[in-house]
Structure formats: structure tokens, C-alpha cells
Image (spheres, rainbow, N blue to C red):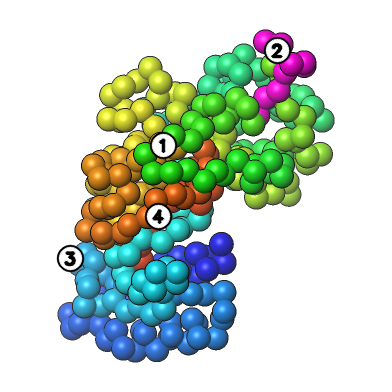
Amino acid sequence: MRRCAVLLWVALATVATWPPVDAAADPAAVRSVIEAIVNNDDSVLGASVSAVDGTGFRMDAAASTGFSRTDEQQRMAPNIAVRAGTVGELLLACVVIQLQSEGVLPQADEGIPSRLLPGGSLTYVNPNFPGQPLTIRMLLTHTSSLQDPLRFDQNPALVASGSTAQSLQAFGIDFFTTTASTGSATRSVRPDLWTTDQPGVDSSYRFARVNIALLAYVVQLAMADRPQLATIPTVGALIQERILTRLGMTSTYFMLPDGRTPFVQAGLATLGSTKQVEPSAFQIHAAYVADYMCLTSSADLVKLANALF
């Protein structure tokens, strides 16, 4: 995760600090900086920096060093996709804001309806603070008082290309709810999800991927009866169509539970212009937006940062 954070920081710092220029930027000068980062920190395997001018991403203002995949000796490059950690959270937040403006999701401080939460009729409140309903703002800001039980990390499975892992909906029900006894149809919210922190206050900030996993579940449930929102009824496809495609982020994608990425006909073999090939079997998490299933490139991060800032 630290490696991904460094890559993201370098890419965002580039677009945030370099003004538009008429002459081509000097990749050699930039490369000397990122080579020092890679050479002096064993946890950083590779780094890539890209710059933009008024016309968009410029390959002549890019520099890279190290490897994106050491096992295959694949050199780092601006358009090579690498795992991007919590970039998926940012992309999810973007579509959440859009869906709120369209009336598809409740507003940030409104209680999330039970029909959109795992179990369909359960009340998601911290038992220590029964008067505070769960809101989208709490999930986005990690102030919900939810925590990551160890079993969150036990979900990833080695999945062969073309096979299907657990769906986001099935994961949500299994992970967030439980039954009183074997064979019982009565479900309740699992008690090990909650801390003693007060929900909704800044001092209760606790980074937990279950916040984003639960928010992704809410979005996907809201999409269920609205086929016009995305060509494929998944959160990954919604992000692809509403954010990535519109920004030209052809090297950014999610690995979905069945091994597909939206709009990629040849499985994981051809992704935009990157020709990035994934192994025949790979780890995948059902809550792919919340975990490490988002891949992106430094060139695409520049496009995203340019659009945001």
C-alpha cells in the first residue's frame, strides 16, 4: 500500500505544481528525482510521473523508472496499469455525489434506508449510540464507528480467469449480517463491526475498508431497479461509464468478481492501449471498490487530478 501511495503522490504532485508550459518538459530532470526515490526506498519498486499542458496528457513530459511487475521484469511506464489502492474510494465518492444529485441516493446526512443495506430490513446503528442512524457522510469520512474485522482480509480468493468469485451482494449479506442459528432465516447485523466510538464526529475517524464496501453495496442496490444507470449493473461499470470513459482514463479499471472489466472484450488481456496482461489466476475481493482491485496508471492519475483540480 505504501508503494501505491508514493506513486499516487508523485503523480498528483506533478499535476498540482507544474504550470502549463510551451516547451517540452525535461523528463531527465524528473527521472533523476524519482530514481532517487526508487533507489533509496526498498518498498518502492517503480515510479512514474506525467505532466499536462492545455491540451491534456503529454508523453513528452513523462518520466518513469523501476518496475511495475518485478516477477515479469515489466518496466514502469506512464500508461502501464498498477494496483492503486484507495483510488477506488475516490472514484466511488464521485459517482455517489452524482447519484445524490439525481435523487437515486439519500443526501449525505440522511439515514440510509434499510432496503439499501444488507439484510433489507435491518437497522444499522451502533448499539452504543442507538439514536444515530448510519449516513453516507459517515461512510465516506470513516466516522461511522465501523471497523475492519480480520475476516475482511480473509475474503480474497485465488480465482481463475473466466470463473466467478463471490458477488458484492452475497458478500455484503454474509459479511455484515448473521443468523441466530444454523438454518435460521432471521438475520441480524454482526456485532463485531462496531467500535465504542461515537458515530459522525471527527474525533471518531477510523479508516476502515468496510465503510467503502458497505457504501458500494448501497450504490449497487440502488442501481438494481434502474437499468439506465449503467450498461452492466455493477458499481465498477457505473464508475467506468460515468468517470473513466468520459475522462479518457483507458488504463484504469476494476477487476470484477467474474474476472471481467467493463468494456474489455478479451477478459483481462487488452485494456485500452496498455496491453496489460494479468496472470491466469489472481486474487480478487468481492468488495473490489474498497480493496486492491482498482488498477490505474500515472497518466490516468494526471487526467483525474486535472479534472478534479
Of the numbered discs 3 and 4, the one sitting upstream in the chain is: 3
Q: SS for tag 4?
A: loop
Q: SS for tag 1?
A: loop
- Name the residue rendered at 56%, 62% in the picture: 1
- Name the residue rendered at 31%, 69% in the picture: 78
What is the number of the mark on residue 183? Answer: 2
Discs 3/2, front = 2
Q: Which residue is mark 4?
A: 279
What is the number of the mark on residue 241? Answer: none
Distance of label 3 from label 1 (alpha carbons): 41 Å
**The quadrant where residue 133 appears:** top right
Residue 175 versus residue 156: which sits nearer the camera? 156
Distance of label 2 from label 1 (alpha carbons): 28 Å
Looking at the rendering, the stretch of residues picked out in magenta corresponds to: 176-185
Amino acid type at mark 1:
Ser
**Relative to 131, is 236 above or below?**
below
What is the number of the mark on residue 163? Answer: 1
Q: Is residue 184 magenta?
A: yes
Amino acid type at mark 3:
Thr
